[in-house]
Image (spheres, helix red, strand yellow):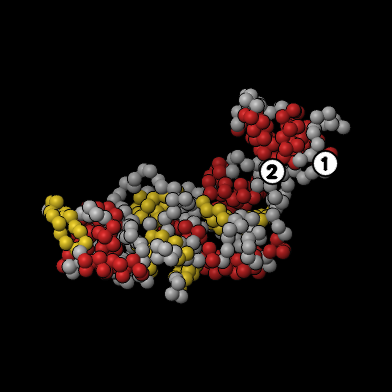
């Protein structure tokens, strides 16, 4: 593979991939691009130079150079001239035979990938250019949560340092919500490629489920093989396994899908419900040791070849299991920060209830919160951060079902409590 140094411009101090003007500037071998162009001609019955350029995401001049090469090799024919820079093309029998051989190796037909060197270089440049995190940004990101000041500061340190975080605590105490709120504290957008190439293999990176495109175009002309997206937030839970942390090869399409940790580069990766996966937690943790220490990850092609890729995201582990049963001290030392979320205090619970009522436009009645707090005490039930929201939402469910205006009162809370906890009614016993 030909080597190239990623050419970038600066957009408000952020790196922007510049449009390549020659095949050499793409960082890819001419033969690799020619084969990709041939597959595009094969898949397009109305193939023109412009359509190839659009599909391959490279300038028209490069696309035409590739097509002229295929024409000279008698793999395609020129059906007609559209203008001085563009022709219409169709595939010949010899080209068809070559395409079938190519598709047996790789079924990828789409935007030209970037080189793995350029991908790595861009991820590193974007991480270096990431704006610093300020206390104001953290407070804004966490404004919907009721957290101690010390906890908010710790979360600010996590975001600013981009070190990992191990979150633990009882179920329903907001661990996942906190992890997702950290994503809101990350400012700026990033560039991700459609795919990158390594050893002649294509690894797809862009994922419409995890990467939200930015609608505003950049102020400079950029390499169309890269897409501007919001910083990703990827949450994985019980489906996590050792296999899903490596390259995923499809026998059907015969190219690779990047694992979730690669797609999370530049954003936040949450390992939710850690310890409940169908694999030993220690095996999973051992898989994370090298990325956590060196900020690099190693992925394996089906040929056995190892690829070194950047590991640049905020990694959060969240669990409600006993930490001592899951990890040893050696692993915890590799974690950037640790945070145990205690159950809410009485005043915190009441404040959460009040804020959630106000957030959905309902009048807050402190007597309702007091009624609930007495019930927790009487049943010796542990309060959770999620309970106020869940109880209020169940009241609204009842209102919607009964075709009545949304509200929260004692009778509705009585029903919500019974539906939520499966316990006896509140009515008539709130002052026992």
Q: Residue tagged by mark 1? A: 379
Point 60% across, 28% down: residue? 361
The span from disc 2 to disc 1 (Cα, nearest Å) is 17 Å
Seen from the viewer's position, the closer of residues 254 and 7 is 254
Q: Quadrant of the image for the N terminus?
A: bottom left
Seen from the viewer's position, the closer of residues 134 and 384 is 384
Is residue 15 depicted above or below 374 in this figure?
below
Point 20% across, 59% down: residue? 90
Seen from the viewer's position, the closer of residues 315 and 306 is 306
Judged by depth in the image, the label closer to the viewer, 2 or 1, is 1
Q: Quadrant of the image for the C terminus?
A: top right
Q: Is residue 124 visible?
A: no
| Mark closest to the chain's N terminus, 2 or 1 | 1
Q: Residue tagged by mark 2? A: 385
- In the image: residue 321, left or right of residue 236: right
Point 44% across, 50% down: residue? 208
Tell me where residue 170 appears, x and y as whole percent. Answer: 71, 51
Point 68% across, 64% down: residue? 326
């Amino acid at each position: 593979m030909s080597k190239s140094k990623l050419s970038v411009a600066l957009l408000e101090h952020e790196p922007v991939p510049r449009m390549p003007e020659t095949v050499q500037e793409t960082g890819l071998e001419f033969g690799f691009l020619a084969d990709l162009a041939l597959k595009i001609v094969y898949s397009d019955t109305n193939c023109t130079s412009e359509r190839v350029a659009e599909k391959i995401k490279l300038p028209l001049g490069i696309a035409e150079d590739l097509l002229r090469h295929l024409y000279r090799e008698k793999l395609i024919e020129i059906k007609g001239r559209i203008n001085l820079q563009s022709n219409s093309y169709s595939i010949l029998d010899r080209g068809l035979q070559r395409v079938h051989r190519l598709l047996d190796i790789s079924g990828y037909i789409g935007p030209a990938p970037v080189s793995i060197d350029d991908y790595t270089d861009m991820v590193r440049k974007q991480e270096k250019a990431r704006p610093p995190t300020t206390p104001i940004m953290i407070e804004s990101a966490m404004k919907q949560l009721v957290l101690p000041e010390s906890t908010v500061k710790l979360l600010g340190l996590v975001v600013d340092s981009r070190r990992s975080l191990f979150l633990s605590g009882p179920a329903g105490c907001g661990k996942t919500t906190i992890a997702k709120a950290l994503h809101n504290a990350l400012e700026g957008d990033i560039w991700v490629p459609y795919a990158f190439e390594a050893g002649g293999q294509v690894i797809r990176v862009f994922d419409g489920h995890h990467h939200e495109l930015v609608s505003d175009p950049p102020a400079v002309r950029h390499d169309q093989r890269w897409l501007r997206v919001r910083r990703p937030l990827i949450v994985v839970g019980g489906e996590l396994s050792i296999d899903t942390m490596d390259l995923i090869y499809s026998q059907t399409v015969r190219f690779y899908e990047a694992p979730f940790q690669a797609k999370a580069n530049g954003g936040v990766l949450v390992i939710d419900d850690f310890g409940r996966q169908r694999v030993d937690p220690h095996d999973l943790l051992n898989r994370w040791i090298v990325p956590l220490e060196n900020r690099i990850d190693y992925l394996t092609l089906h040929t056995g070849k190892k690829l070194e890729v950047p590991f640049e995201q905020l990694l959060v582990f969240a669990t409600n299991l006993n930490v001592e049963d899951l990890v040893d001290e050696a692993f915890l030392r590799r974690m950037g920060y640790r945070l145990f979320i205690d159950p809410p205090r009485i005043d915190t619970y009441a404040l959460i209830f009040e804020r959630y009522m106000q957030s959905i436009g309902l009048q807050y009645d402190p007597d309702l919160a007091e009624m609930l707090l007495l019930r927790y005490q009487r049943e010796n039930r542990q309060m959770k951060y999620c309970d106020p929201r869940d109880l209020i939402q169940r009241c609204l469910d009842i209102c919607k079902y009964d075709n009545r205006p949304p509200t929260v009162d004692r009778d509705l809370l009585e029903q919500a409590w019974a539906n939520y906890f499966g316990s006896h009614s509140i009515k008539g016993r709130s002052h026992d």
